[in-house]
Amino acid sequence: MQKMKKRPSFLIWILGLIVIFACNIPAASTPTPDLLATLSAATPLPVDSPSQNQFTNEPTGKIVFVCQLFKAQASNQICIINADGSGFQRLTTDNTRQHYYPSLSPDGKNLIYAAFREPNIYEIYEMDIASGIVTQLTDRLGNLNGPEISPDGSTVAFKLSTASSNQIWLMNRDGTNPRPVPNAFGWDPTWSPDGAFILFASDMQGPIQLYRVKPDGSELLKISDLPAIRGRSDWSPDGQFIVTYSGAPWNRDVYIMNSDGSNARMLTPTGGNSQGPSISPDGQWVAFTSYYDNYRVDNGCEIYIMRVDGSDVRRLTSNDYCDYQPRWGP
């Protein structure tokens, strides 16, 4: 009789343990698909995933680029166009100079660029787009190009070339206090969205790759491992991804990778010789130069855009000569 009385208590104790154990089992989580793996597989991104861009926005903002005018004798000027292809406008007006590497200020109100002054001398200029007023920021500092304004608007990064090396330099927004970035021997600087790092291309450790460095020259790190990287790259607005271009002449393509260089994926359809990518301010589009409609025509490049997953490629420009070096801004 005593055994019969104890059995219910024993069973209740066992059942209690089972209930407690079951309540403490963590619920199975739904893994978040990796963006770049999704791009590689060419599978549509889940529209209900808050951790992924929902590639639905139409392109906004403006794109500045080098526009070659006068087909008989090319004149490299700076032009601007709305991201939907409307509103084409020539910004620079000096036909005696060649203009390169345009970029917009963080607020989109100003243009910064390099222009040919005399043999081996390029100066950096800033233009107020509304008024057209141009200010020369440098004076015989050397052969300069690739200027980019920092996200806080205070500093300009650029490349200075000498007979023996290329190095990233900084100066104040008004052109004062030019100084080299220690250890940053390369070209095509690009600021991270928070201004903490500068991305640039370099061959200082062998074949050209992408490096990042702090503005004071510390924490230099090689981040890419792609064949035949060329130069101008860009960060996504959230700092998580980088777009660049790689490949042999006439076979270059645009790639996207994590900001540490991992998970590199080709975005552009092959056969266009695509290069010089720039990400839109909302992170959903990429502008780039390509020869899709004029392949292997030396001066047949145009500006194209595509969604950041490589879909929906659109041609923006239709110039008699070449349009290249696009940079997206607000």
Image (tube, helix red, strand yellow):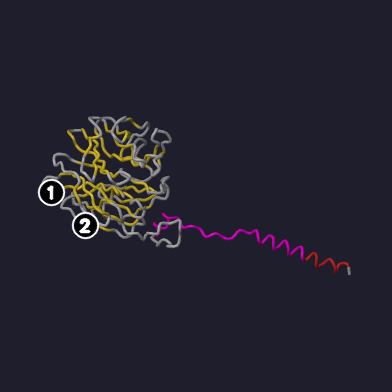
Image quadrant of residue 139?
top left
Q: Residues within 10 Å of mark 1 (few under 14, many from 20)?
A: few
Query: Whole-percent x and y of residue 279?
Result: 33, 50
From what the image shows, is residue 259 above or below residue 160?
below
Q: Is residue 329 left or right of residue 225?
A: left
Residues in magenta?
12-41
Assign a secondary structure to mark 2: loop
Assign a secondary structure to mark 1: loop
| Residue positioned most to the right | 1
> What residue lies at 86% left-to-right and 67% top-to-bottom?
3
> What residue lies at 21% left-to-right and 57% top-to-bottom?
293
Residue 293 is marked as 2
Query: Whole-percent x and y of residue 214?
Result: 40, 36
Q: Amino acid at mark 1?
A: Lys
Q: Is residue 277 left or right of residue 323?
A: right
Question: Which image quadrant: the N terminus?
Answer: bottom right
Q: Amino acid at mark 2?
A: Asp
Q: Does residue 198 show up? A: yes
Query: Whole-percent x and y of residue 25?
Result: 63, 59
Q: Main secondary structure of the magenta part?
A: helix
Residue 172 is marked as none
Residue 165 is covered by the magenta coloring: no
Q: Is residue 72 left or right of residue 120?
A: left
Residue 16 is covered by the magenta coloring: yes
Query: Whole-percent x and y of residue 17?
Result: 72, 61
Using the numbered discs, state the Cα–Cα distance from disc 1 to disc 2 in whole angstroms.
18 Å
Q: Nearer the N terminus, badge 1 or badge 2?
A: 1
**Residue underneath mark 1:** 71
| Residue positioned most to the front | 131
Q: Residues within 10 Å of mark 2 (few under 14, many from 20)?
A: some
